[in-house]
Image (cartoon, grey):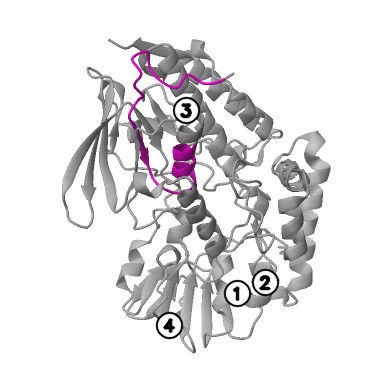
Amino acid sequence: MGYTKTYKDGTTPTVAIIGAGFSGLCAAIRLQTQLNLYTYTVFEMETDIGGTWLANTYPGCACDVKSHNYAYSFEPNYDWSTSYAPQPEIWAYLRRTARKYNLYEKIQFRTEITQVIWDEGRQKWQLSFVNLNTGEKGRMEADVVFSALGPLRIPQIPKEFENFEGPKWHTARWNHNYDLTNKRVAVVGSGASGIQVVPSIVKKVKTLEYYQRTASYIVPRRNARYNAIWRWMFRNVPFFHFIYYKMLYWSSEYTVAAFSSKLQDRIPRMVMVLMAWFFRFVQIRNKELRKKLTPDYEMGCRRIVVSSNYYPALSRKNVNVHTEAITSVKGNTLTLRDGSTQEVDVLIMATGFHVQQMFPKGFMYGKDGTDVAEFLGASPTTYYGMTTTVTPNLFFLLGPNTGLGHNSILFMVETQVEYGIKAIAYMMAHNLSSIQVNHQAAQDFIDEVDHKMKGMVWSSACKSWYQNSEGRVTALWWSNCSHYWWRLRKFHPKRFIATQKI
């Protein structure tokens, strides 16, 4: 059954898409291909598309999800070179896709959305923006907004590092003009970025001081290469790519059991824990170093990282691993809690991102003048699908309750976009100016999330970026989660409050 593609008067809604990464591009493509809707504008702060994959260009940057699962289902890439695609290939794929669908002409680059306000009287969103090149300000009125503000875009930089007097940068703002050869380098942070950076620079630096706050669980990265024969089969053998894609997807989906303490999941969980332990034991021969790199929390609480060269890199003679907290930074010297000091030439911050802070207070005001940032902070899981009860016609493409660490986030993105497409089609079919989730639907969703989270590792005492500052879990992590999100593609009008167009 096809979607309704216009209002009764033949018009289509005006749509604003904030962000031109994977999520924003997906929304734009599906508006075109499923609704034949071209009355949309994409706003992007940077000079090109790509989002996370434009910003993060540090050495060793690559995806930790299998390549063939890290592409749009409707736009497969048959030419990945390896099992885990490097950043340049992912960015090239996005640009190639954007050109195929003529998206560049719909994007306003170097344009920052500064405020988004719902106008109840006009039943529209009022967006304020500024051109970052000229400083010129403008406004746009939109019927529908897709928020595609990715979580890995705002670097988290501790204030104490501002005192460092030498060259310094965050991994998401890599300085490619500075040569690290024979330099004394400090890398702060042991998340995915730090784990990828260290092996990529360790052979060229004189010394590497590595500051680890919390050890990560590491599993092997079997990064096989796809030769010309593989690529030919993906492109020419019927259903070969589709079957391969599904096999990769479900093999990754099965690992969600590693995050559960439920009886039926204990065996696969034990297998994952033993794999990580054995991998660490084999690759690290120094007992003292192995102790530093052994996590002291339940597996899965924090993101599990895939890497086969991280432990060997930290075992090199020119690397010193520090687990004490940095207490002060003066000049080029870092002082630790135990009183030890290290003088370095360069400071590299792999200190992560403001994942929970999708946008600041005062940025978005929904119905009844509600500050959406404050609303989400007070009730972080008040979502049903993509929309909160206070934001009519707004679809969050990567908000709370969409975090993944065992499979491709693109499945979540496509699911949410399709839900938005169905909502817009419903609005046009019934001549509606707005729809918003009713309170009961939102509460039912919260209750289901809380119920499903019982017995999962994030409901224990552990702390990670999958929780907000109040300890509430903001990720959907349970068995058969893809089945659950597939259900969200079904649009149920009874769960919404609708306003008829005048």
Instruction: Return the disc, 4 or 2, that comes first in the chain's sequence.
Output: 2
Q: On residue 199, which mark appears?
A: 1
Q: Which residue is drawn at 22% across and 51% down?
A: 131
Q: Are marks 4 and 1 in contact (CB under 8 Å)?
A: no
Residue 362 visible? The answer is no
Q: Residue 441 location in percent, x, y?
A: 50, 16
Q: Which image quarter is the N terminus in? A: top right
User: Which residue has dot 2 on it?
Assistant: 309
**Residue 362, picture quadrant:** top left
Question: What span is colored magenta in the figure?
Answer: 2-29
Q: Residue at x 75, y 72 (%)?
A: 283
Seen as rendered, the residue at the extreme right is 267
Depth check: 415 or 383 in front? Answer: 415
Judge depth for marks 4 and 1 and give the one in front. Answer: 1
Instruction: Return the disc, 3 or 1, that comes first in the chain's sequence.
Output: 3
User: Which residue has dot 4 on it?
Assistant: 344
Instruction: Return the disc, 1 or 2, that comes first in the chain's sequence.
Output: 1
Q: Which image quarter is the C terminus in? A: top left
Q: In this view, does 6 lie above or below 401?
A: above
